[in-house]
Image (tube, rainbow, N blue to C red):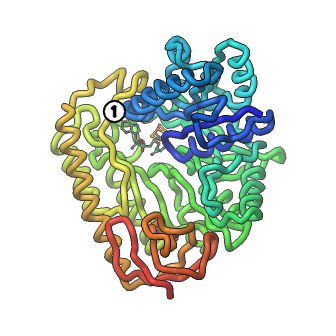
Amino acid sequence: MKKVYIETYGCQMNVNDTEVVFSILAKEGYIRCRDMEEADVVMANTCSVRDNAEQRIRARIGLFNSLRRKNPDLVVGILGCMAERLKEELLASGMVDVVAGPDAYRRLPALIEGAFGGSRGIDVQLSRDETYADIKPLRTDSNGVSAFISIMRGCNNVCSYCVVPYTRGAERSRDAGTIVREACECFEAGYREVTLLGQNVDSYRWKGPDGKETGFAELLAMVAGVSPLLRVRFATSNPQDISEEVIRTIAAYPNICRHIHLPVQSGSDRILEKMRRRYTRDWYLDRVRLIREVLPGCGLTTDVIAGFCSETEGDHADTLSLFEEVGFDSAFMFAYSERPGTLAARKYPDDVPPEVKTRRLEEIIALQNRKSLESYRRDIGKTFEVLVEGPSKRNPEQLCGRTGSNKMCVWTDSVHEAGDYVTVEVEDCTSATLLCRLK
Ligand code: SAM
Ligand code: SF4
């Protein structure tokens, strides 16, 4: 039995893809290995969204190759977005034996076999219909409580800064029946939370053999119907596509978590248009108002990019004022990184100097840290139902778990275990954790 070690970079979708890859390889007799020194096959499932992600992975490819000194037969593979973006360039480096894009994982066993036989292999063909719907992911990066379920692949949006549509191809939705089946299997295996994944979940649409269409709101309701004890989360929503129907479906099911990740990217209409985001600042703020009206207490988080092409101090001030106005619970904040082949790279100069991008990013981070603390402080004195994820990393006498609104809680507890629901009262907080006691 050959041993396979895989490192995963980037988004939750990649974490789930790695689980799909392990499942495909397990059927051919490969076993998962957690120590790369012992592996026969070492692979990285990669991310191309920002240049620094790619640089980190390039350093890892160097390290993987140093393992060949001890094991000359070692097969080194690159999977995912970097494989798709760089294609033959990776093989030409002489450091990689197998290159497989996100839609080529069914061919991995053959590619790896070929590499053991001495021939380097590549498959970066993107597909119009591959969703790996029939493959039961081999859950790896899991606490046994929360699982990821991909509901669609690819993206049709072509935001001007983003490489994803080029590396993951056109959008396609997965058979709704297989999604519900996977959620049932997760529940039966003891999982108590599933996160439905897609780059733009609101455009999920599946047409069954009977011609009946299922949209995202219906899919949410179907998965929530698996059991009231199964929490349902989802990511990512797009501000232009999130519908009132979806927001009202969340309100109708207590087990659909009240948390929406709604990436805004910028607070300036001029920049949003250049980014080819199909909404304005006012539209975004209006969606936030609707969410808060229909779902009081709903967690709201976002992504933002500082220093996109031609961004002025005025545009940046618009982003800061939007962050001030909305008061997100937390945010993923990035400096713009030009990605070759994207519309922005072809059309717009990357003209905000690096030190200005860094300063603007730091200003957004400082503001968001203050807002996060305000948001967490507002919860002091409140009680929440929390799903136990396991022991807290910092203190083994404490357990940790999330509120429905996706805030991490810790509390002292020697009674409960992972998978239990408990009620806690918030006593204190940091800007990222609610410090609680068991009720
Ligand atoms: N599909 C999701 C959406 O539309 O918001 C997000 C996908 S992307 C993998 C995750 C985040 O990375 C984006 O929301 C954006 O903030 C950031 N991102 C994407 N391209 C970037 C770039 N070229 N430079 C910096 N950040 C980028
Ligand atoms: Fe990229 Fe935009 Fe698609 Fe998100 S919606 S993956 S940011 S192109």
Furthest residue to the bottom? 439
Residue annotated with mark 1 = 337
Residue sitting nearer the eye, 110 or 361: 110
- Residue 282: horizontal and vertical position, in percent? 33, 55
Amino acid under disc 1 = Ser
Q: Residues within 10 Å of mark 1 (few under 14, many from 20)?
A: many
Q: Is residue 70 left or right of residue 301?
A: right
| Ligand 1 has an atom within 8 Å of the beta carbon of the residue at disc 1 | yes
Residue 332 lies, with reference to residue 416, above or below; the image says above
- Residue 255: horizontal and vertical position, in percent? 62, 71
Please report the residue visible at 25 percent of the width from the left and 64 percent of the height from the top.
Answer: 370
Residue sitting nearer the eye, 357 or 298: 357
Residue sitting nearer the eye, 353 or 68: 68
Please report the residue visible at 76 percent of the width from the left and 61 percent of the height from the top.
Answer: 184
Residue 395 lies, with reference to residue 269, above or below; the image says below
The quadrant where residue 229 appears? bottom right
Ligand 1 picture quarter = top left
Question: Can I make out residue 279 in this image?
Answer: yes
Quarter that holds the N terminus: top right
Q: Is residue 409 left or right of residue 372?
A: right
Question: Can I make out residue 253 in this image?
Answer: no
Please report the residue visible at 37 percent of the width from the left and 82 percent of the height from the top.
Answer: 427
Please report the residue visible at 60 percent of the width from the left and 57 percent of the height from the top.
Answer: 195
Residue 35 lies, with reference to residue 213, above or below; the image says above
Helix, strand or loop at label 1? It is loop
The quadrant where residue 124 appears? top right
